[in-house]
């Protein structure tokens, strides 16, 4: 298991070809001695550095690595956020029907019309926002691709992107790949039982300046379970307006909310309609993380740029699954209530087991993760603890450091996912009871 910081700089070597600057024959065989036609005695070329400098600035995903570790050690996988229960029967049928009906060729690059219409309808129903499906929606291969396509479409080298940390680990590498510099603002854990993760208004303001291009906002939040309040969103909105900044919002847990918490989309706030990219997808709401269907909703000009990037990255998202997506987004409103209630039950199943085992749990208000404090176990780092947990106890979690720029900030935290069957959570609880404080 790698100890890792997503955006920590590793010194990337300069390409030797660039360093030398002189023109050399493509192959030593082509270099002839001008006088006798014999091959010239060429110096062995310095080997080229074949990798992009960019990839030196991050490592592969710790979350996905923990899934591989779970498989290796036969551990219960509470690391990666994918359900281990079936997806809704109606949408699986819709996918099967689409394949049978030969919806098997490329869809329109920016998304099948049926799905874009359904997304626009949902935006109207849930956010009260009217969106033009022909001009403002791009369907991508998951919200993951929607996020990187958006950043590639809007960022220039030297632009800065504000990110709350702990953050969903993709955002760090996404910023680096798009040439932007991430600027992190801390979310601080609740001080008292059942309290909220909060941020310091002054610290947030300090992160904004004339180089700031965008803020990435994930609400409901992974990994903290924080759901940003209207007052917090208004504060962020005011900064976006003052510094002429875009909001790129990741709302894929929009329907997974507890205790009457309200999800507010940034795009609905006064002044934000023209400066917000709203990202969402099917993975979490319909329990189909493997289908890879997500989308970005943005003003026309930004959508045109996102569509260009998306086209050349992937051509399009899976065509039959987009048709099934249109069916999924047409499920009745009760579906969403049941989804959230199902996750509340799972949360309340796992949290007591974690508390009994010695974890301090930060109660999530939304999404399907619980961030915990592991101080009681006396391990030096979260990575050492996570290794012990997966190898000796048989439960996989995600080390907290993978959600922070500076690994020390997450050294006393680990995250558990509870999007699992009751039997899976029972088995995890049985194993966690073997932990020693
Ligand atoms: C905050 C957040 N955004 C995006 C994703 C990935 O979503 P998708 O499957 O739509 O690419 C995840 C997955 O865990 C997530 O937690």
Image: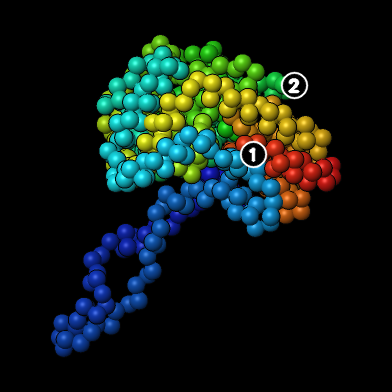
C-alpha separation, residue under disc 2 versus residue under disc 1:
28 Å
Residue annotated with mark 2: 192
Describe the element under mark 1 as helix, strand or loop: loop
Q: Quadrant of the C terminus?
A: top right
Is residue 183 visible from the viewing direction of this image? no
Q: Please report the residue visible at 47 percent of the width from the left and 52 percent of the height from the top.
A: 56
Badge number at residue 420: 1
Which of the 4 image quarters holds residue 154?
Answer: top left
Image coordinates for residue 379, horizontal then vertical, percent: 77, 46
Location of residue 166 with respect to 123 vertically, above or below: below
Image coordinates for residue 255, horizontal then vertical, percent: 53, 24
Q: For this rendering, which residue is in front, 136 or 7?
A: 136
Is residue 127 visible from the viewing direction of this image? yes
Q: Quadrant of the N terminus?
A: bottom right
Image coordinates for residue 407, horizontal then vertical, percent: 62, 42
Q: Please report the residue visible at 26 percent of the width from the left and 74 percent of the height from the top.
A: 27
Location of residue 287 with respect to 11 vertically, above or below: above
């Amino acid at each position: 298991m790698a100890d890792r910081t997503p955006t920590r700089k590793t010194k990337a070597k300069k390409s030797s070809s660039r360093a030398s600057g002189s023109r050399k024959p493509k192959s030593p065989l082509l270099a002839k001695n001008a006088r006798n036609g014999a091959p010239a005695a060429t110096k062995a070329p310095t080997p080229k550095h074949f990798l992009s400098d960019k990839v030196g600035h991050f490592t592969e995903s710790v979350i996905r690595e923990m899934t591989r570790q779970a498989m290796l050690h036969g551990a219960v996988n509470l690391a990666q956020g994918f359900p281990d229960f079936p997806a809704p029967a109606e949408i699986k049928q819709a996918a099967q029907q689409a394949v049978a009906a030969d919806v098997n060729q490329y869809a329109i690059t920016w998304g099948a019309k049926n799905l874009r219409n359904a997304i626009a309808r949902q935006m109207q129903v849930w956010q009260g926002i009217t969106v033009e499906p022909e001009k403002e929606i791009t369907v991508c291969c998951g919200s993951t691709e929607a996020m990187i396509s958006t950043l590639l479409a809007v960022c220039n080298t030297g632009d800065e992107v504000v990110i709350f940390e702990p953050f969903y680990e993709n955002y760090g590498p996404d910023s680096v790949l798009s040439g932007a510099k991430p600027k992190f603002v801390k979310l601080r854990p609740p001080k008292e039982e059942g309290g909220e993760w909060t941020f310091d208004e002054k610290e947030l303001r300090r992160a904004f300046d004339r180089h700031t291009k965008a803020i990435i906002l994930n609400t409901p939040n992974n990994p903290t379970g924080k759901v940003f309040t209207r007052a917090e969103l208004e504060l962020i909105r005011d900064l976006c307006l003052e510094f002429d900044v875009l909001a790129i919002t990741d709302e894929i847990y929009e329907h997974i909310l507890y205790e009457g918490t309200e999800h507010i989309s940034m795009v609905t706030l006064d002044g934000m309609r023209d400066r917000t990219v709203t990202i969402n997808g099917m993975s979490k709401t319909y329990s189909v993380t493997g289908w890879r269907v997500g989308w970005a909703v943005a003003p026309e000009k930004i959508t045109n740029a996102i569509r260009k990037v998306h086209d050349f990255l992937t051509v399009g998202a899976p065509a039959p699954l987009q048709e099934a997506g249109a069916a999924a987004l047409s499920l009745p409103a009760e579906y969403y209530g049941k989804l959230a209630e199902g996750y509340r039950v799972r949360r309340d199943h796992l949290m007591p087991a974690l508390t009994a085992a010695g974890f301090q749990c930060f109660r999530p208000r939304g999404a399907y993760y619980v961030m915990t404090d592991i101080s009681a176990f006396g391990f030096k780092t979260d990575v050492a603890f996570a290794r012990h947990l997966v190898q000796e106890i048989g439960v996989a979690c995600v080390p907290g450091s993978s959600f922070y720029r500076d690994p020390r900030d997450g050294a006393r935290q680990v995250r558990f996912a509870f999007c699992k069957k009751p039997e899976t959570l029972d088995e995890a609880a049985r194993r966690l009871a073997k932990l020693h404080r």
